[in-house]
Image (cartoon, grey):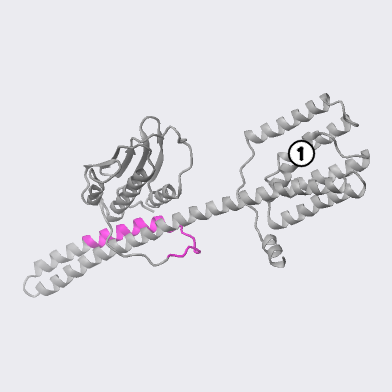
Amino acid sequence: MGELLRSVWAEPRVADPPPRGRRDRALVGGVAAMAIIEGLLRSDLVSPTFSLIVALALVPTLWWRRSRPLSMVAIAFPVTGVAALLAGHEPELHTGAYLLILAFALFRWGSGRQMLAGSSIILAKICLSGAVGHLSPADMAGGAVVVFGAAALAVALRYRATLWVRGLEQAKLRERERLARDLHDTVAHHVSAMVIRAQAGIAVAPTRPEAAVDALQVIEAEATRALAEMRLMVHGLRHRTSTDQLEPVDLAPSPGIADVAQLASRAQPGPVVDVELLGDIQDIPATVATAVFRLAQESVTNARRHARHATRVEVRVVADATSVRLRVSDDGDTSSIRSTAPGGFGIVGMTERAALLGGTCAAGAEPGQGWTVAVALPRHAPTG
C-alpha cells in the first residue's frame, strides 16, 4: 500500500489538457438549464429555492474543471456540505449529480497529490453528511461507490491516453533509428568511393599526375555529397531529446528510388500494385530516395492489410528540381472510415520521417477514391 501511495503521490499532472471550448459552454449552459427546469417543475422539493441556488452557484466550477481540478473540488464539495448544514438537509436536485464530473476531472487531469487531496475532501464531505444524519450508512456507501467509480473510469482513460502517447513516441523513435541507419549507409557509400579514388590517385600519381587531379576532383564531389547528406539528416535529428536511446540497428544496404518499382505486383494475392516513376529521378540524395521507398512500402503494406474490397493500389513518384512527391492511393471502400480519424502508429512514423527531412505527409480517406497517402519531400538538404 505504501508503494502504491508513493507512486500516486509522484504522478505528474497531465500535460496540455484540452482547452475550454464550445463543448464546455454547452455543458455549463445545459446543466444550468436542467437545474432551472427541475427546480421549477418538481413539486416534492422541501426547499426548491435553496436547492436551485446551490446548484446554479456551483455550475461555473465545470468551466475550470480541467485547468484547476483540485480547486473546483475544494469549492464544490465543501460548499454543498456547509449548505446542507445550514438548510438541515442535502441539496435535493438530481441535477446536482454533475459534481461527479468534477471528481472525474480531478482523476483524469490532476496530479497524484491533487488526487489524494481531492479524495480526502470528497470523503470528508460524505462522512460529514453521514455524521449529521443527512445520509444513511447505505447512502454513504452508495455515494462513495459512485464517486470513486467515476474516478476509476477517469484513471482508466488516463492510463489509456498515456499508453497511446508512449506508442506515438516509440513510433517516432523507430523512424529516427531507421534514419540513423540510412545516414550510416549513405556516408559509408561516399567514404568508400573516396577511399577507392584516393588509392587509385596515389597509384597513378608518379606516372600520370593529371589522373591524380581527376581523382581529387571525384573525391571532392563525393565529399560534398556526403556532407550534404549528413547535413540533411542532422537537420532533422538535431531536435531529438537527450533521453532518446537508439538501439543497435541492422546495417544492410538501404533501398532507393529505383527499388520503388519492385513494389509493383500483379501476381500476389490482394490488390494489384502499379508503380509509376516520373520526372528527374536521377541523382536524388540517397536519404531522400530511401525515405520515398520506405514511405511507399509502408503505404502499400497498409493498403494490402486494411483497404476493404480494394482491387488496385497506385504508386506514383514525381521528381523535379526542388522536390520529390509520392502519392499512394487505393480504390478500397472507405464508407465506414472517418476522413478525420487519427491515423495509427504507422501513419505517425511516416509523418515523423517526412518531417525530419523537412517534408510533409498527409493520409486520409477520399470519398469514392479510397485511402490516399500524399508525401512531399525537398530534393536537397534544407539550409540553416
Q: Is residue 223 magenta?
A: yes
Taking the view exactly as shown, the residue that stands out farthest to the left is 207
Magenta-colored segment: predominant secondary structure:
helix
67 left or right of 169? Answer: right
166 left or right of 52? Answer: left
Q: Secondary structure at mark 1?
A: helix
Q: Residue at x 84, y 52 (%)?
A: 124
Does residue 91 sit above or below 161 in this rendering? above
Does residue 343 sit above or below 368 in this rendering? below
Question: x and y percent of residue 145 in the render?
Answer: 76, 48
71 left or right of 174? Answer: right
Question: x and y percent of residue 119 in the render?
Answer: 76, 53
Q: Residue at x 83, y 24 (%)?
A: 40
Q: Residue at x 36, y 38 (%)?
A: 372
Question: x and y percent of residue 152 in the render?
Answer: 68, 50
Question: Image quadrant for the N terminus?
Answer: bottom right
- Of 378 and 137, the residue lying toward us: 137
Query: For the magenta stretch, what is the residue range?
Result: 221-246
Q: Which residue is mark 1?
A: 97
Residue 108 visible in the picture: no
- Of 37 and 356, the residue lying toward us: 37
Q: Is residue 92 magenta?
A: no
80 left or right of 362? Answer: right
Amino acid identity at mark 1 = Ala
- Of 363 and 359, the residue lying toward us: 363
Q: Residue at x 36, y 41 (%)?
A: 373
Q: Residues within 10 Å of mark 1 (few under 14, many from 20)?
A: few
